[in-house]
Image: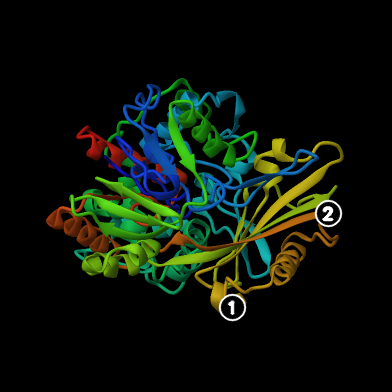
Amino acid sequence: MVAVVSLGWPWSPGVATGALGCSWGSRGVPKGAVVSLGCLWRPGVALAPAPAQVVLLEASARVGGWLQSTRTEDGAVFEHGPRGIRPVGAVGRDTLHMVSELGLEGDILPVPGDHPASRNRFLYVRGALHKLPSGLGGLLRPVPPFSRALFWSGLRDLLAPTSTQPDETVHAFVCRRFGEEPAVSPQVADIAVDSLCRGVFAGDCRALSVRSCFPALFEAERHRRSVLLGLVLGRGKKPGAESPLSRRARAERWSQWSLRGGMESLAAALAAFLRQRGVELHCHAPLRRLRRDPGGGWQLALADGTVTADHVVSAIPAGALAEVLPTEAEPLARELRHIPAVAVAVVNLQYEGAKLPVTGFGHLVPSSEDSSLLGIVYDSVAFPEHNRSGAASLRLTVMLGGAWFTQSFGDPAAVAPSLLLRRAQDAVRAHLGLEAAPSHSIVKVHKACIPQYTLGHWRRTESIGRYLTEQGLPLSLVGASYAGVSVNDCIASAKAAVSRLLGQPC
């Protein structure tokens, strides 16, 4: 009997379980279970009926984790978590293959390469919006907010020696590779890269690990002696599940895609797909305690019963898993506690008949400009299909907090939604010139939603893997806490764990 424990999706996964061969504990709770929707799907495998009884235990009231969408009565869709998925790489192709097998091709909303949301991204620096440079011309001449042509930073990268350090912060890496002169480094590292890390991880580039957060940059330097050369030449195409949808995405150069019903519809479709194949899904079933079973497996204590399983696959956040492990697994719990996560406030706003001063995906804000404000996404530009029916409207999403949440707003569990809404409206007014009050707003505070891969994260994950192997623990760890925070990364993590469990190539 195998149990996979997971709870939700990225940013921060949740808890569920699954089993091959299931018996029942007290109060009708299954003894074996598989957890994580991602773990239950593999290309070419999920199409067949499940080989054994499978049960998914979800801690919350709904499946999908941070994939959360709200559809209003007038047809508008507001995303409270990920709002689009990138189709690039093997992991991107695998996700599109999943979409195809779930029968969602007709619901795909692509953003092609020539779309303004693909071509235009902005930074808000020194009180003004600046379009990020693109094309050769943007590299050869100074383009605000950069006072020096980025070409010179690229030249520095081609000449810089390779580091022998096993890891360094993203900020230190960029300063070293792209120039340490005051006129260059602060602008590339302190503005561009600082903003990028806030947009992807809601984190501080001075604390995040380049090896774990941007492995492609780290590997490019190691193998090509230059970040730019490494990215251009690459290391060969990794295998991925090709599908007509992934080939279309490549031909049309999609920068991202969403679904007509919102990103949550991906989780809903996968849940329906699994139910049709005999998988049982139980919500309101949080994991209270994990104990070793005398038979060598696990006992999973829930609020209303106990599940026993031969193997557990956990997709709950690292910190949450640390709190439910048995005392004899304290060395593992200690490593897990060193993988922190930050809170993000997501404020959705809708304006009637409003016009943006610029057209693009959105803009990011460096921490030197305003540490509390991560950025603003222009949702109606990328996905106008999610606008309400009838009169013209504009949807925006303001992201607040991240690594700066507590210092800016206090305790994420106690902050007043009205404070966050007011802060979001002030930002829209100052940055985009929208003076009117929004006609609709939604405020969500996602606590501990994005794991932070701080300096030395790779050592922690290696230590965790060694401990599991040396102790012979029937436990697999998947989800955003370990090897990537994106939707694609979490799906790939689950797929790899199940492949290893089944003794098949990843």
Query: Which residue does the image show at 59% across and 78% down from the upper left?
Result: 410
Q: Is residue 475 visible?
A: yes
Q: Is residue 146 visible?
A: no
Query: Which residue does the image show at 31% across and 33% down from the upper left?
Result: 237
Query: Which residue does the image show at 48% across and 53% down from the upper left?
Result: 59
The residue labelled by disc 1 is 410
Looking at numbered disc 1 in the image, what kind of residue is underneath it? Gly
> With respect to residue 180, does 348 lie above or below?
above
Query: Which residue does the image show at 40% across and 67% down from the upper left?
Result: 340
Is 160 on the left-hand or right-hand side of 387? left
Is 40 on the left-hand or right-hand side of 447? left
Q: Quadrant of residue 265?
A: top right
The quadrant of the picture occupied by the C terminus is top left
Estimate the x, y position of residue 220 in percent, counting from the top left: 29, 50
The residue labelled by disc 2 is 439
Point out the residue furthest to the front here: 26
- Name the one closer to the observer, 315 or 144: 315
Confirm or deny contact between disc 1 and disc 2 (CB under 8 A): no
Point out the residue furthest to the left here: 470
Give the mark, 1 or 2, whose residue is nearer the N terminus: 1
Is 207 on the left-hand or right-hand side of 65? left
